[in-house]
Amino acid sequence: MKKLHYSFFAVLLVVAIFSACTAIYEDGKDLASVTKNYIKQIEADSLKAMIDNGEEFLLIDVRQPAEYEAGNITGSFSIPRGELEFLITDEAFWEEQFMYLPLKEDKIIIYCKAGDRGILAAGSLQKLGFTNVFNLKGGYTAFAGDNTPVVKKAETGGCGG
């Protein structure tokens, strides 16, 4: 009986270990390609129609500030990818934007340059309990078409430059 008892716990332990395993990805693109299967996406033309029709939604640009300043979708808020999980539920941040704190069921559309950062950002929001999150398929590049600005990287050099 004691042997059966230990066998049961051994099997239970093995099941627990294997069910807790997570995949390991090569890079962010690999992770985004898998995450994409769980994220709702919206086409650029659909977003343009929503904007034209005056629909209500929260539009968040998760690119870096220099990218946002070079060009963005009118009405979007800049929240860089690395800060999104912290600022999305920060009342003080939204008060500074003259906005209410987003509700978990509010329609939120995320975009980046081409889509991968947006996919990961949308996945993070879903993990935080937001239920109506979309990624702009193709990102700002798809929305702006040929008008996508090229962002120059700051030059760095010696002597603190």
Image (cartoon, rainbow, N blue to C red):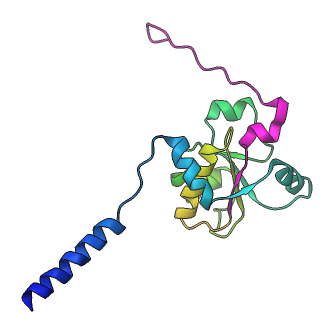
Query: At 72% from the left edge and 24% from the top edge, which residue is drawn?
Result: 150
x, y (%) of residue 19?
36, 68
Query: At 32% from the left edge and 66% from the top edge, which residue is drawn?
Result: 18
Q: Is residue 150 magenta?
A: yes
Image vertical order of residue 8 relative to residue 97, above or below: below
Q: Is residue 149 magenta?
A: yes
Image vertical order of residue 22 relative to residue 157, above or below: below
Query: At 88% from the left edge and 58% from the top edge, which residue is drawn?
Result: 54
Chain part drawn in magenta: 133-161
Q: From this viewpoint, is residue 158 visible?
A: yes
x, y (%) of residue 48?
86, 50
Image vertical order of residue 145 relative to residue 1, above or below: above
Q: Nearer the viewer, residue 121 or 53?
A: 121
Q: Is residue 97 left or right of residue 82?
A: right
Q: Is residue 10 left or right of residue 143?
A: left
Q: Quadrant of residue 140?
A: top right
Image vertical order of residue 10 relative to residue 5, above or below: above
x, y (%) of residue 129?
56, 68
Q: From this viewpoint, is residue 82 visible?
A: no
Q: Nearer the viewer, residue 129 or 143?
A: 143
x, y (%) of residue 27?
48, 40
